């Protein structure tokens, strides 16, 4: 006999860390080059990529756990390897709507950078490899860049009510970008000079 509301019982599911494929994940969202118009700095390279097939940059899946008293949520992101011009594939990046909502990011596979920006003068880049865990305090906009040759997989754990503000990131941009220079991944101020 059920004593609690159905959602108040524990939930488990399986995830393949290397591929980011799992059960229980729905709400798949895909972002192609054409969805990232204001994110990549090299507009000519971006338009060429769109016309050349509009590559899939990343996809993410969300699972919400809403109980009678709580609102936990996770998202698995699969960020593909590649570049637009000399800038590595990355996520759009966002700030949480609520200024009291942090997030935990856990890198399950791949390597690159987690870029963090308060959009108010503070910037950090956390070097990421498989197994890196980063706490993102509430006021930091966050974006991930994949500098490797393999897919990057990471999981974000946050409250479903945190909210996502993309417009502010589009308007202000991150202070630095991750580009390839002399065959190596480098952080340079935004906007960089084209090489
Ligand atoms: C993540 C992100 C996910 C995709 O789940 O939503 O990695 O990145 P964008 O949302 O910037 O496109 C998260 O940070 N949730 O809060
Ligand atoms: Zn977030």
Image (cartoon, rainbow, N blue to C red):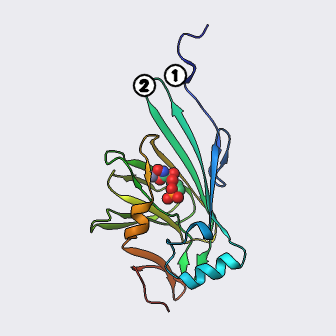
Measured Cα–Cα span from mark 1 to mark 2:
8 Å
The percent position of residue 97, horizontal first and vertical second, equals: 38, 50
45 relative position to 139: left or right: right
Residue behind mark 1: 8
Q: Residues within 10 Å of mark 2 (few under 14, many from 20)?
A: few
Between residues 137 and 49, which one lies in front from this camera angle? 49
Disc 2 on helix, strand or loop?
Answer: loop
42 relative position to 69: left or right: right
Between residues 48 and 8, which one lies in front from this camera angle? 48
118 relative position to 14: left or right: left
The percent position of residue 189, horizontal first and vertical second, equals: 37, 80
Disc 1 on helix, strand or loop?
Answer: helix
102 relative to 36, above or below: above
Residue behind mark 2: 69
Q: Residues within 10 Å of mark 1 (few under 14, many from 20)?
A: some
The percent position of residue 93, horizontal first and vertical second, equals: 46, 61
161 relative to 93, above or below: above
Residue at the spot x=58%, y=29% of the render?
11
- Looking at this view, name the residue that lies furthest to the left: 121
């Amino acid at each position: 006999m059920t004593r609690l509301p159905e959602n108040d019982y524990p939930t488990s599911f399986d995830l393949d860390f290397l591929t980011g494929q799992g059960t229980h994940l729905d709400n798949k969202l895909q972002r192609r080059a054409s969805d990232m118009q204001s994110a990549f700095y090299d507009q000519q390279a971006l338009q060429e990529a769109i016309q050349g097939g509009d590559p899939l940059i990343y996809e993410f899946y969300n699972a919400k756990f809403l109980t009678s008293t709580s609102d936990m949520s996770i998202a698995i992101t699969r960020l593909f390897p590649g570049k637009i011009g000399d800038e590595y594939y990355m996520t759009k990046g966002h700030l949480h709507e609520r200024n009291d909502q942090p997030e935990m990011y856990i890198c399950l596979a791949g390597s690159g950078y987690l870029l963090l920006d308060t959009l108010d003068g503070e910037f950090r880049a956390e070097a990421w490899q498989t197994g890196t865990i980063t706490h993102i305090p509430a006021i930091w906009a966050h974006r991930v860049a994949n500098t490797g040759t393999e897919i990057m997989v990471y999981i974000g754990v946050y409250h479903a009510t945190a909210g996502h503000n993309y417009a502010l990131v589009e308007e202000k941009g991150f202070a630095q970008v991750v580009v390839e220079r002399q065959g190596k991944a480098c952080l340079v101020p935004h906007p960089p000079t084209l090489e």
